[in-house]
Amino acid sequence: MRLDMRNRLGAATLALGLSFAGPVLAQGTTGTAPGAPTSPPAAPPAAEAAPPAAAPSAGPFVFSSPPSAQANRIYSVNVRTGEVSACQFERPEGSLVGVTRCFRTDASAGPREPGPYDIVSTRYSGETGIFRVNAQTGQMSVCYVRDMPKDGGGVEPAVVCTAPSR
C-alpha cells in the first residue's frame, strides 16, 4: 500500500513538474519493492499523442503563503518568467462546499525578463503579500492583492507588484 501511494504521488509529482523528497518509482511501474525487476512501461497507443511541448511561460512554479494568520491565500511564481498569481479559499454564504478563488494578474505581476525567480515571505505577522525575487539580478518586488479600478466603474481584486528594485 505504501509503495502504491508513493507510485501515485510520484506520477502526480512528475505530471506537475514538482520535486518529490521521497523515492519515486518511474511511471508505469508496479508497486513492487525497490530493486525488484519491473517490466518496462507499455508504449502508448497510437491514438494517444505525446502532450505538446510546454509554452515558454509554463512552469515550474514555487508556492508560498504570507505570514499573516488572517491571510487565507497562496501565491505562486513562475520560476522562469517571474509571473505571480494568487488564489484563496472561500465558502459562499449558505454553501456547504467552498471554492478556490484565483485573482486576475495585473500587468505589474505579469512575466518579467527571463531569469531564476523565487518567492520569499517575511516574518512580519501582519504581511499579506510576498516578495518576488530574481536570484540572478537581486531585484525584488513586493506582490499582493489589491482592489483595482475596473473599466466602467467599480473595483476588482487583482495581483499587483511594485516595480523591481535592489
Image (cartoon, rainbow, N blue to C red):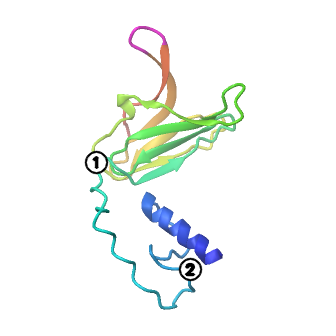
Q: CA distance from mark 2 to mark 1?
A: 40 Å
Q: Which mark is first along the chain, 1 or 2?
A: 2
Left of 79 or right of it: where is 147? right
Provide the major secondary structure of the magenta segment. loop
Q: Secondary structure at mark 1?
A: loop
For this rendering, which residue is in front, 162 or 93? 93
Q: Is residue 19 visible?
A: no
Left or right side of 67 for 16: left
Amino acid type of the residue tagged 2 in the rendering: Gly
Rendering coords of residue 81 (x, y %): 33, 46
**Left or right of 71: which side holds 21?**
left
Q: Which mark is residue 74?
A: none
The segment highlighted magenta reads 150-154
Compared with 154, 138 (above or below) is below
Q: Position of residue 166 (x, y in %)?
A: 38, 40
Instruction: Please state the horizontal and vertical placement of residue 118, each as a whole percent of the image.
Output: 44, 50
- In the rendered image, the vertical position of residue 21 relative to residue 145, given as above or below: below
Is label 2 in contact with label 1 (beta carbons under 8 Å)? no
Q: Can you say whether 28 is above or below 118 in the image?
A: below
Kindly report which numbered mark, 2 or 1, lies closer to the viewer in this rendering: 2
Rate crowding at label 2 as few (under 14), some (14 to 19) or many (20 or more) other CA atoms within 10 Å.
some
Give the residue number, with chain letter if any, for mark 2: 31
Looking at the picture, how far across and down is residue 99, in whole percent?
60, 36
Circle 1 sits on which residue?
114
Q: Residue at x 48, y 67 (%)?
A: 11
The N terminus: image quadrant: bottom right
Looking at the rendered structure, the kind of residue marked 1 is Pro
